[in-house]
Amino acid sequence: MTNWFDRLLGRAPATAAQTAKERLQLVLIHDRTDLSPAVLETIKDEIIAVIARHVDIDAEGVEINLSQGQRQNRLIADIPLLVTGNAHNNGSGARRRPRK
C-alpha cells in the first residue's frame, strides 16, 4: 500500500537506511502504545493522502512521531508544505476565501 502512495505522490523510492529508520521508529512507537506498526504506517499513509488532496506537500519530508507525556501520548505529524505562486489555491482547484 505504501508503494502505491509513493507513486501517487511522486516520491522517490526510500533508501535502505531510510526504510530501516522508519521501521525502527514504528517499533519504538509500538512499544509505547497499543498500536501495531502496521496500523501506524496506515495512519501515516492516510494522513499524507488526505492532506495532499488539499495542499501541495513535500511527501519525502513528512515525519510522524509519538510524544509521550505524563498523562497522554501525542501523535505529531510534521508535514512540510510546498509554496506555490498561488497562495490561495488549496490543491483541488478550488479557492479558499480570504479571512476577514
Image (spheres, rainbow, N blue to C red):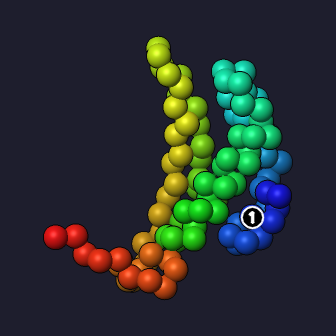
The residue drawn where x is 49% and y is 70% is 55
As displayed, is residue 48 above or below residue 94? above
Which residue is at the far left? 100
Q: Residue 90 or 28: which is nearer the viewer?
A: 90
Q: Is 63 positioned to the left or the right of 28 in the image?
A: left
Q: Residues within 10 Å of mark 1 (few under 14, many from 20)?
A: some
Q: Residue 29 or 36: which is nearer the viewer?
A: 36
- What SS does tag 1 mark? helix
- Quadrant, the C terminus: bottom left
Which residue is at the far top? 70
- Asked whether the viewer can see residue 59, the reply is no
Q: Residue 97 or 16: which is nearer the viewer?
A: 97
Which x, y percent locates residue 72? 50, 22
Q: Is 57 positioned to the left or the right of 34 in the image?
A: left
- Asked whether the viewer can see residue 65, the reply is yes
Which x, y percent locates residue 8? 73, 72
Q: Which residue is mark 1?
A: 5
Q: Residue 66 appears in which quarter of the rendering? A: top right
Q: Residue 30 appears in which quarter of the rendering? A: top right
Which x, y percent locates residue 85? 39, 83
The residue drawn where x is 59% and y is 62% is 50
The residue drawn where x is 59% and y is 47% is 63
